[in-house]
Image (cartoon, helix red, strand yellow):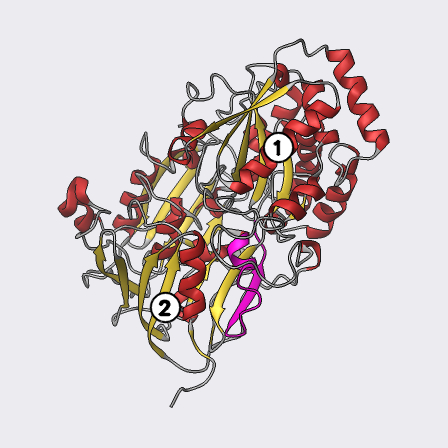
């Protein structure tokens, strides 16, 4: 795979449940009770975003946790989804660790040293760490794991595009050399590119690794207990863990969607969940036995144009960005739990120079207004007239889930308001994911109603999607200056200098509407009011959130 790619840390993420049944304002929650208050209950722009929850003070024997899907695999090199990541972040550890505040620090690498020219990263491996089979974690395991991540066809292989060599250079040392400085590589090592595997266990399991019935190959605070396909998945505290021992001894994961998800939390059948669907969280706001926490996230709702029809012309894309009602989508489609947003990257990506990124975001209203004014519509109409969109309708790709339906209808209305014909193509949800991964599946749509997140707290982890050679640049955007600035930013180690470059490429990306940002989506944690401790930010996908889970006070 090439530099920017779907899934995980670098680009698109499978937040398919995010918009699965999100229409709240007028229709309620797919069979679940609508919370008191009817329409938009919250203003996402005013939500208090917490990196974590108050520390727990008492242990817990067992917690029942809810996922919106069953994991498809527990081998994050060959596959894996958000659901699998929620489980594995407690089981598998990485060379760096993404913190709840979305910063990163060396972890299984107890020390990391970058050379003065930025072309060499030396990792000193932590001693005293054991895998769950009791064997010691070594530099050999680290090197083998990095090479597995980098292998062709693996999910993380694009993270290693600037790597010239990886070698064991001491008993506890691995050195990575680069063809050019790479400002985001260390951050990738806090994602799935930094997992350290137990080579012996993976080779023993072979192609079955990551499937039900197979043990894990990791070193985290929890080990995989059992996985009963279609029923439940259990993790248990690992007694030989090298770090701080978990407060909760056992976590049992089950999965449900829509009203079943809501009812499991409401009845106490589940103690907590990270709610990917904002409407499920909204349906639980009135429940006094549950507490909700909102945290920083990089997730966003987006429109992704293709080069098939009218939206291949940047003037039509810019016109659509001017005309679409972001505020209306947030309020009517997501109960106010998402915030109208100009870029395809949530503010959780601002892991450095936050003031600079915040100021730059405000300046983008000229290209992506929260609610279009009459002047915006007139500007859009002039762009359309100059482009001459022809008579063929713009085809909007979506599935039948309610959140995406809201966005699709808003997109059609916006296009029609500026003189562009549009129609909606709806496919089954099971087929929708093919739009992301298969260009043939996109051959008859002009724009996709999508969602995305990145794991890196750095906007440059996203904006490489606009490079001319990116597989995620579906619109065929080509700008040599943009490409040069992205390459320069990715090789700039100084945060202040890189942020200035990032602000430039962000403006050009939004101005050209390579993708059209609609809203940013916070992390939503729903938790039994007697419990506390997990991270509340998007770091829950990469940080051992269950290790801090416990009771507010000793139940005895």
Residue 514 in percent (x, y) is at 62, 26
Placement of 503 over or under 280, stated as above or below: above
| Image point (67%, 9%), residue name | 390
**In the image, 134: left or right of 246?**
left
Q: Secondary structure at mark 2?
A: loop
Does 519 lie within the magenta span? no
Q: Which residues are magenta?
A: 279-297
Residue 543 in percent (x, y) is at 43, 59
Tell me the quadrant of the picture where the N terminus can be found: top left
**Count of picture labels:** 2
Q: Residues within 10 Å of mark 1 (few under 14, many from 20)?
A: some
Q: Residues within 10 Å of mark 2 (few under 14, many from 20)?
A: some
Residue 204 in percent (x, y) is at 13, 47
Reading the image, the residue beneath label 2 is 269
Placement of 185 over or under 134, stated as above or below: above
- Along the viewing direction, whichever of 472 and 3 lies nearer the viewer: 472
- Along the viewing direction, whichever of 41 and 296 lies nearer the viewer: 41
Placement of 286 over or under 229, stated as above or below: below
Tell me the quadrant of the picture where the C terminus can be found: bottom left
Q: CA distance from mark 2 to mark 1?
A: 36 Å
| Image point (41%, 24%), residue name | 438
Residue 409: image tag: 1
């Amino acid at each position: 795979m090439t530099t920017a790619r779907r899934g995980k840390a670098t680009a698109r993420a499978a937040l398919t449940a995010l918009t699965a049944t999100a229409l709240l304002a007028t229709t309620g929650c797919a069979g679940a009770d609508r919370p008191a208050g009817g329409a938009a209950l919250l203003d996402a722009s005013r939500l208090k975003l917490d990196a974590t929850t108050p520390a727990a003070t008492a242990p817990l024997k067992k917690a029942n946790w809810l996922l919106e899907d069953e994991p498809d695999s527990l081998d994050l090199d060959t596959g894996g989804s958000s659901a699998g990541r929620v489980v594995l972040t407690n089981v598998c550890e990485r060379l760096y660790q993404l913190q709840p505040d979305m910063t990163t620090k060396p972890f299984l690498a107890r020390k990391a040293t970058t050379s003065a020219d930025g072309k060499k990263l030396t990792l000193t491996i932590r001693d005293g760490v054991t895998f769950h089979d009791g064997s010691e974690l070594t530099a050999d395991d680290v090197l083998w794991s990095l090479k597995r991540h980098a292998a062709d066809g693996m999910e993380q292989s694009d993270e290693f595009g600037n790597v010239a060599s990886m070698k064991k250079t001491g008993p506890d040392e691995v050195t990575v050399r680069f063809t050019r400085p790479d400002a985001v590589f260390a951050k990738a090592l806090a994602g799935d590119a930094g997992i350290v595997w137990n080579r012996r266990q993976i080779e023993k399991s072979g192609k079955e690794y990551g499937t039900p019935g197979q043990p894990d190959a990791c070193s985290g605070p929890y080990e995989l207990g059992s996985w009963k396909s279609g029923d439940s998945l259990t993790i248990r505290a690992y007694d030989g863990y090298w770090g701080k021992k978990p407060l909760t001894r056992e976590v049992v994961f089950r999965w449900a969607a829509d009203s079943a998800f809501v009812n499991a939390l409401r009845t106490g059948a589940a103690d907590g969940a990270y709610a990917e669907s904002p409407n499920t969280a909204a349906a639980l706001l009135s429940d006094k036995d549950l507490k909700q926490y909102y945290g920083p996230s990089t997730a966003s709702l987006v429109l992704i144009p293709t080069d098939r029809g009218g939206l291949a012309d940047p003037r039509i894309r810019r016109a659509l960005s001017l005309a679409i009602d972001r505020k209306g989508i947030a309020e009517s489609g997501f109960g106010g739990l998402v915030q109208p947003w100009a870029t395809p990257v949530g503010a959780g990506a601002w892991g450095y120079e936050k003031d600079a990124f915040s100021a730059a975001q405000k300046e983008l209203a000229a290209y992506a207004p929260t609610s279009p004014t009459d002047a915006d519509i007139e500007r859009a109409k002039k762009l359309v007239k100059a482009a001459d969109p022809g008579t063929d309708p713009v085809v909007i790709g979506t599935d039948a889930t309610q959140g995406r339906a809201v966005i699709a209808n808003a997109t059609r209305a916006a296009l029609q308001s500026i003189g562009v014909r549009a129609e909606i193509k709806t496919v089954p949800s099971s087929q929708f994911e093919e739009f992301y991964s298969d260009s043939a599946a996109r051959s008859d749509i002009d724009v996709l109603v999508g969602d995305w997140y990145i794991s890196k707290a750095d906007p440059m982890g996203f904006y490489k999607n606009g490079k001319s050679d990116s597989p995620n640049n579906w619109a065929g955007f080509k700008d040599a200056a943009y490409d040069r600035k992205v390459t320069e930013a990715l090789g700039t180690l100084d945060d202040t200098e890189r942020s200035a470059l990032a602000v430039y490429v962000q403006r050009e990306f939004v101005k050209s509407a390579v993708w059209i940002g609609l809203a940013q989506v916070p992390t939503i944690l729903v938790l039994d009011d007697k419990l506390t401790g997990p991270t509340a930010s998007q770091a829950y996908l990469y940080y051992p959130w269950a290790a801090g889970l416990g009771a507010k006070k000793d139940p005895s």
